[in-house]
Amino acid sequence: MGSFIGKRLLAIIPLFLFATLLTFLLIKLSPVDPAEAYLVAAHIQPTDELLAQKRHEFGLDQPLPAQYAQFLMKMCRLDFGTSYVSNESVWQEVSIRMPATLQLAFSSICLAVLISVPIGFLSALYKNKGIDHLSRLLAYFGASIPQFWLGYLLIFFFSVKLDLFPVQGRGGWMHLVLPSLTLALGLIAIYTRLLRASVLEQMQEPYVLYARTRGIKEKVIMGKHVLKIALSPMITGLGMNLGKLLSGTIIVEVVFSWPGFGRYFIEAIFNRDIPVIQAYVLLTAGLFIVCNLIVDLLQMYMDPRISWKGKSEA
């Protein structure tokens, strides 16, 4: 196990380097001049003299390899520069907004798991019964409705009409209900059907028949063996969506005025705040890499047929 984790951690290094190189090149290929963007954000009239001064200050007059080396050294120190708009450290501002995104992401994931696992499992056990038809209807609805529309519908009915939950902003647990439900519904639709299909597939495997012939109770077979292995595809999807949620679910944060990482990124795009954009891209890449590593470890724990050497033991 330790050697596997070590190999995966070493594999993260070239992925991160590729992400930094791609981010650096995209910024260089963009038509936006960082020096001009800084002066415009500071409400200073750009002149040739000021532009030359800022380009020298930002190191833009150096060769590209030297610029990339300097950029990479700063990224390793988590130094993303200073925001053009607020003149504050980008890392400090990200640290302030990230807890809000973490709170929203984990609450949405927990809500999706708590609902999709029992519904998906029961819809497989009682195929073509009432619970199965209900899960199918829920999946169709959750997969087809746009998130922004669902968010406004929830605000209209539960905040404006019924006055049960706050309309916007972040505060107590009541502020978290509607945005979490908006994010979770799409995940519930996907994971319910995914788990149902996986459970039905596992029920046809030879080990299930062998366990039944040995006289093992059906509850033990389904709960301890079938469900544990059937969760593997769902864990993969959760890992990918967790990285997406942690990087900031932009639409929901904008609809509910949630002060998270995604909304901060949108504001940076409109303001052409290049250091913030660079920080968002790199942190998003890092979050996806870490989430994929966690998913691999969870899959190996959930599925005993997978060894730590990556070979099948079955």
Image (tube, rainbow, N blue to C red):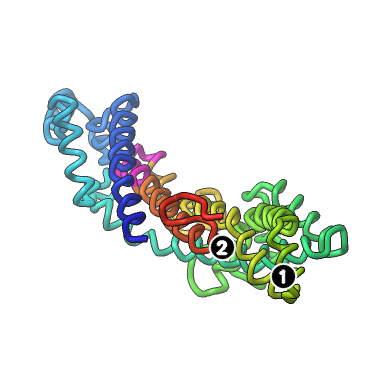
Whether residue 7 is visible = yes
Disc 2 target residue? 108
Whether residue 253 is visible = no
Percent position of residue 148, x then y:
62, 49
Q: Residue at x 12, y 35 (%)?
A: 57
Q: Residue at x 68, y 54 (%)?
A: 198
The single residue placed furthest to the front in the displayed view is 214
Is there CB contact under 8 Å for labels 2 and 1? no
Kindly state the secondary structure of the residue where label 2 is placed.
helix
Kindly state the secondary structure of the residue where label 1 is placed.
loop
The range drawn in magenta is 269-282
* Residue 291 shown in magenta: no
Q: Main secondary structure of the magenta part?
A: helix
* Residue 274 shown in magenta: yes
Quarter of the view holding residue 189: bottom right
Quarter of the view holding residue 156: bottom right
Looking at the image, tell me whether mark 2 or mark 1 is earlier in sequence order: 2
Q: Residue at x 83, y 59 (%)?
A: 127
